[in-house]
Amino acid sequence: MRTVVTPSVDTPEPQPGLRPVRLPRRWLLLATGVLGLVVLLAMVTGPAGLPLRSVLVEMVNQLPGVELDGGLDEREAAVLWKLRAPRIVLGMLVGGMLAMAGAGYQGVFRNPLADPYLLGVAAGAGLGATFAIVSGGGRLLVPLAAFAGGIAGVAATYALGRSVGGRSTTSLILAGVAVAAFLTALQTYINQRNVESLREVYGWILGRLLTAGWGEVLTVLPYIAVSTVVLLAHRRLLDVLSVGQDEAGTLGVPAGRVRLFVVLAATLGTAAAVAVSGLIGFVGIVVPHIVRMLAGTSYRIVLPLSAVFGAAFLVSADLAARTLISPGELPVGVVTAFIGAPFFTLVLRTSRRVW
Amino acid sequence: MSGLHLHQVGVSLLENRVVDDVSLSIPAGSWMTLVGPNGGGKSTLLRAVAGSVDYDGDIEFAGTQLRGMRSRGRARTVAVVPQEPARPAGMTVLDYVLLGRTPYVSYLGVESAEDLTVVGELLETLELSALAYRAVTSLSGGEFQRAVLARALAQQAPLLLLDEPTSSLDLGHAQQVLELVDELRGERGLTVVSALHDLTMAGQFADHLVLLAGGRVAAQGAAHDVLTEELLGAHYGARVRILADPQGGVVVVPLREARSQSDGKIHDGRAGVA
């Protein structure tokens, strides 16, 4: 039977029991717990074996108003706070950023294969870094050139996409393919002419989290913070976009503008991450998919959980990268793919279809 | 001026003139149905009214030009039931219908208690309450069509556009959906514009029929003025017989091609199969 419920005019109340989608608290707790464990493990693991208890005490010591003696000497404390901690924090920032940017790209392009490198960030940053390395630029110039190159790559893609296909997402993606191919060709040419710096360029491309103190963290933090806030603010609009550009338009969402904002924010954060860490693949594509399959497809779930799980994933990959062949180090990009690919396959086989 | 008024509306897609010089006028609260052959311009004209394609000429509803309205304002004025709505993976019926509240949610905000109240009522009205937490991908065609209708009604727009709302439904479900639209139109004073393939049903449910062919208005008026053997023959290339329904409607009956009995062949496509 049809019944017409008359709502009270002045104080509208939600229908009892109507629960729209939101971030499940247990998943947030689980993700934060996993991240906490991984960070702790990364803090106590390394060539300078620091006792777990001392590390814990030292960490509690950082809280304001706490004065405890963890029993670490000056050198050990320096290892903990000037080497390990900044590297772990950088891993969290970069991993969280790449995963969230990937989720944002997948949302605006409605394409499971979209990753944060889709529109030319990677090729542009690669070219920029290559330029800086072959011209003998130091630690300062390479990230700057990579950042500028990444932004320029996406800007070129947008301009080209607009000029050939107006507002269609397909023309934008194809423009990204063209721009990336062109920039990669340039980069290859420069590398051919400068074989002596090939090893350094290659090392950058494979990605690494090398830090000296907190400089890198402080450099990327503002960009990643802005990007995170903008992406999270678009969580509901990304859900609306899941019905496609035309339908979203009739629902009152200017799809082109939403896409521009999300791509801008994701590009800013990705370029900053790439500038300090090189091209770490796989995080941006795999983490959001695993979150979708396990916790839910709404961007109110996918964006925040991708950030936390992406952070945990990259910190553990980096932990593996610096311990597996200790005292040597593997490029972390190799590890993300090496751990990530089988894990992804496993989740694919056991989970429900989400695209 | 209340009601919906189209004045010399034209749409070009990739340099093809898909809709040309269409002028139509209907009073508020009435139901206009567009019929016509494939490619006649029905969907494109609806997309123009919805603001999904650029058009020339003027479209005015309730005294307001639709062109130049901001997207949120337009979504509060015009709601659309698309021909092939997307089914987002993993989204529940409740969240899907809540998408219709988008024009009332601030750009970066989330739904309010009032949005939930409106949607809760609609779920009851359209008998979707029991399906609220089912994934839209798991619904039958008829159930999903009700969810799409609920989403459009959640926009609380006085103008409702339906593009082939029954194309994926069987006869019974098609009738149910159209009856439901008619009932809601009465209750809420909606102005409805639909495109329909089924000519008999188009005649039954519309106050005003418009035959679009080649992007132009070939005929318009009441069912018995538009659904004639001559017009349907000329514009659809169809052989039909028009019967008078004893209850006052018009029944369109397609006819088989007359064939000589002497050639002895079976023309149903299975000839020669032993």
Image (cartoon, coloured by chain):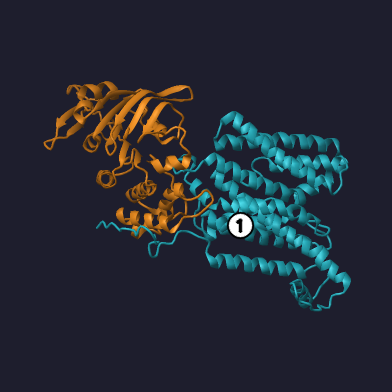
Near-viewer residue (B105 or A326): B105
In the picture, one chain is orange; tell me its letter: B
Chain to which the residue tagged by mark 1 belongs: A
Q: Quadrant of residue B168?
A: top left
Residue A29 visible in the current orientation? yes
Say which residue appears at 70% left-offset and 38% top-offset.
A153
Q: Looking at numbered disc 1 in the image, what kind of residue is underneath it? A: Ser
Q: Which residue is mark 1?
A: A306
Q: Position of residue B161 (x, y in %)?
A: 35, 39
* Position of B184 relative to B39 (above/below): below
Which chain is displayed in cyan in the rendered image?
A: A
Residue at 26% x, 31% y: name it: B209
Locate the N terminus of chain A by quadrant: bottom left
Q: Left or right: where does residue A136 sit relative to residue A347?
A: right
Q: Residue at x 34, y 51 (%)?
A: B143
Residue positioned 64% across, 53% down in the render: A228
Residue B195 in percent (x, y) is at 32, 35
